[in-house]
Amino acid sequence: MTLRKPPLSRRDELITQAQVLFFTQGYDGTTVSDIVQAANVSNGAFFHHFATKEALLEAMSETLAYQSAKELEKSIQDRRLGAVERLNILLAHARGQKKAAASTHQAVFEAVFWKNNAVLYDRIATAAIAVFAPVLAKLLADGVAEGSFHVSDPDITAEMILQLAFVTRGAFTQIAREDTREGQQRAAEQLAIRLQHFGVVVDRILGLPDGTLRLTHDGYALDLAQSRKGRARRRRAEHYLGGKSK
Amino acid sequence: MTLRKPPLSRRDELITQAQVLFFTQGYDGTTVSDIVQAANVSNGAFFHHFATKEALLEAMSETLAYQSAKELEKSIQDRRLGAVERLNILLAHARGQKKAAASTHQAVFEAVFWKNNAVLYDRIATAAIAVFAPVLAKLLADGVAEGSFHVSDPDITAEMILQLAFVTRGAFTQIAREDTREGQQRAAEQLAIRLQHFGVVVDRILGLPDGTLRLTHDGYALDLAQSRKGRARRRRAEHYLGGKSK
């Protein structure tokens, strides 16, 4: 008699294996069969949990957003610090996470921005806002209580700030489309400018002096842009070498 | 020999007739055949201009956004007024337009919010931002020049403000889903609260005192919500009476 894995761990196993495959061979370069093989489950098991590869990516994004939100929450536990400092710690942490979660981010990047997939973007963004909004709202409420932030409704303010993060979407789409080093650099500059403005806008929304919050740091946008470039290049190479395709 | 309409006017005629039909029988209740018949053109002519009914709706939205932007631009021509006053005139005008353009707005509302169609929403919103951003950016630049607005980049600021308008999307989706008068009222309150906050956020982004700009007025959100309700009710009635469906 074969010991069958319980359903929950099988779903997790599929997500974990997919994550590794997306990172090593790209989202497009990974088929459902690849994932099923790596996870050592049947095709039926895959489709029991996910209608499509895209559905798995969505679930993966949700899981990662949840883990990321938990970590961010932990990073701002030290209540001896003021709310402004805690918010800057949270923002720095969030930038750090983007690198650590390169595999999912890369898969999302490919699936959403390469193909300009509005449905998937919308689902992932909505799910992410739902997960991050309460963490940010709590911190805003702390800041209001201690007199550092000046907003009347922390919940709606958190929602609006997260909504504003979407102004970087165009710049990300542009990065995904650029093929040359110069194009990537131009797109990275556009992203950096938007992140700087975003920072000032959040300062003002919270009633802080311009330049209080840091939403970017030197080289951050270019780093992000160039990690994409490596992938785009590798994928093109794979394509010409007759590598796997969907 | 039959006189054939030139292509441009035929496209416009299709849009104009579709607009009337969407208003009288709803977006879903209108078929491509209905539009073709009303415009007195062939099926081939329709599909020469639009791949689908949705593509026509998208073109209609772009046309309306363009007309609307031209009108808004005209409403703020009086340079004897200050930029703050001109921006408030523009905002009041924009609210007025929403009522006047009820037919398109209704069709968009049905097609986008009833079905939560992210692709169509994304296309229409992106096109609208592209059309409205330069008008707003010009006014912001005027305000910076006269010392009333305090922003470093009018173009990016205009883009961010328009991007923020999307925070009302959730409230609109909720309005579309609510069937009861109480549900509609709750959804309208949510929309009103978001519009008020949006106003304060724009004040702060531009460096103005809270409450300077008016993004809503008494009864505005409820008006919007209830005009939807009428439609939802009528459509249900049609459905039960065996009216046209897609």
Image (cartoon, coloured by chain):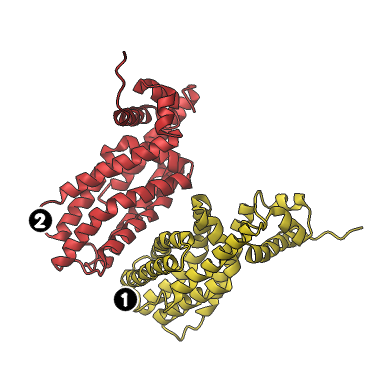
Chain colours: A yellow, B red
The residue located at (44%, 37%) in the rendering is B54
Residue B218's tag is none
* Foreground pick, B176 / B166: B166
Query: How far across and how far down the image is residue B49, in percent?
Result: 39, 32
Chain bearing mark 1: A
The residue located at (34%, 55%) in the rendering is B165
The residue located at (30%, 73%) in the rendering is A207
Secondary structure state at the residue bearing disc 2: loop
The residue located at (39%, 37%) in the rendering is B57
* Foreground pick, B85 / A224: A224
In this figure, which residue is indicated by the disc labeled 1? A208
Secondary structure state at the residue bearing disc 1: loop
Q: Nearer the viewer, mark 2 or mark 1?
A: 2
Query: How far across and how far down the image is residue A75, in percent?
Result: 52, 79
Query: How far across and how far down the image is residue A219, in percent?
Result: 44, 77
The three-letter amino acid code for the residue at tag 2 is Arg
Residue B146 relative to residue B92: left or right:
left
Residue B79's tag is 2
